[in-house]
Amino acid sequence: MLKINENYQKLPGSYLFAETGRRIRAYEAAHPDQEVIRLGIGDVTRPLVPAVTKAMAEAVAEMGTPEGFRGYGPDFGYSFLVEAIREAEYTRRGLQVESGEIFISDGAKCDVGNIQELFSADAVIAVTDPVYPVYVDSNAMAGRAGDWTGEKWSRLVYLPCNAENGFVPPLPDRDVDVIYLCYPNNPTGTVLTRAQLKPFVDWARERGALIVYDAAYRAYVTTPDIPLSIYEIEGAREVAIEVNSFSKTAGFTGTRCAWMVVPETVCGLGADGSRVSLNALWKRRMATKFNGVSYPVQRAAAAVYSAEGQAQLKEVIAGYMDNARIIREGLQAAGFDVYGGVDAPYIWLKVPGGTTSWAFFDRLLETCQVAGTPGSGFGPSGEGYFRLTAFNTREKTIEAVERIGRAWG
């Protein structure tokens, strides 16, 4: 009989958002007359903008003609999208990224989950704590996390981020092979300045480590001196892979399109001690396991960079960030300690009264009919905190804050 990958059996319970969803559904079933306002999962609510849907519709129409039909596309993305990304996201900002270093995929979650296939089985992984669960779970599934102790994984190196250190993670206190960084940060909604990010690049260069940098929320940054790409830091092209997404930037959570930059200068060590290009390995992996994002979706993504697309999306992002302001200011008025929500669509709050984050989840759901995400689900340093998102409608965001204010204000 087939022997399964036993590392899956080490995973604690269900995936974080599956568990929050289960509890919400149970509450709704028991209270059908109550409307639950969801401020938990980071899923967008505004529709795709007209520039995007127009481009997608035109591409679908093309596919219905003999001369416009396309079968398998390029493994790493159509050149029209690759070049649009390269020009708008890097070249215009004075950053060096080559066309052959950009890979189009069906989501940043997929990329950060799949990139670990390039790492050796005994690679030592460091994560900020709290952290987006996919970084941890994907390495746990591969056996690199060790054993689950009930609070943390035995082989992971945790870099605690909390109010006491201003949510700036410390450098690893031992040698590691990979460091996962996400900025603007999910879940805390906080950011790093160039001066705060540079030590990580310098450390990785000195120690021969790789940085996996998740910049999926870069479009929400408005504060000066906050880097939008890790390649703004000198030397980052030697040690960093950057992951980006159209999901939160352009509402593609259900449409699925993202990109990852793997510079040709980023290398790992082969079995014989020679330097091996991760770019070449990722090309091999993509060509073997992925048939690309559909032509209509890539045309839609390219429309994000049109003048019309940029103007329309600026309004959408401003709307979400106004929701973040409403949540942040409303919670502060109710007496909560609140972080984030300035350069990111996430608000990270201190759980009141010394209760646990899951107990606060249940109380918020039962008392206010508002759903968020317990901080402990993001790692041991997340205990005592709670995440809310700005991705619901303005009307429901206001109503949720008013409900919380009545309960705690």
Image (cartoon, helix red, strand yellow):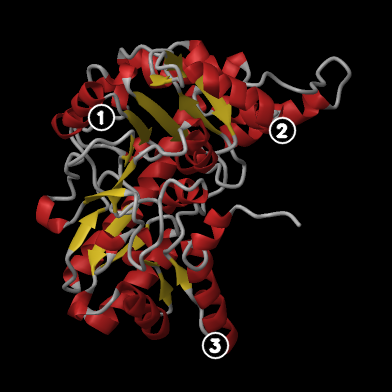
Type of amino acid at the residue the image marks with label 2: Ala
Q: Is residue 183 above or below residue 240?
A: below
Of the 4 image quadrants, the one containing the C terminus is bottom left
Label 2 sits on a secondary structure element that is helix
Label 1 to label 3, Cα distance in Å? 45 Å
Q: Residue at x 60, y 52 (%)?
A: 5
Q: Residue 193: give its label.
A: none
Q: Nearer the viewer, mark 2 or mark 1?
A: 1
What x and y, as percent, mark residue 209? 30, 28
Q: Is residue 169 above or below residue 400?
A: above
Q: Is residue 345 left or right of residue 12?
A: left
Q: Is residue 23 left or right of residue 241?
A: right
Q: Residue at x 32, y 77 (%)?
A: 360
What x and y, as percent, mark residue 94? 30, 12
Type of amino acid at the residue the image marks with label 3: His
Q: Residue at x 40, y 29 (%)?
A: 242
Can residue 108 be seen in the rendering of this structure?
A: yes
Type of amino acid at the residue the image marks with label 1: Pro
Q: Residue 57: give its label.
A: 2
Residue beneath disc 3: 31
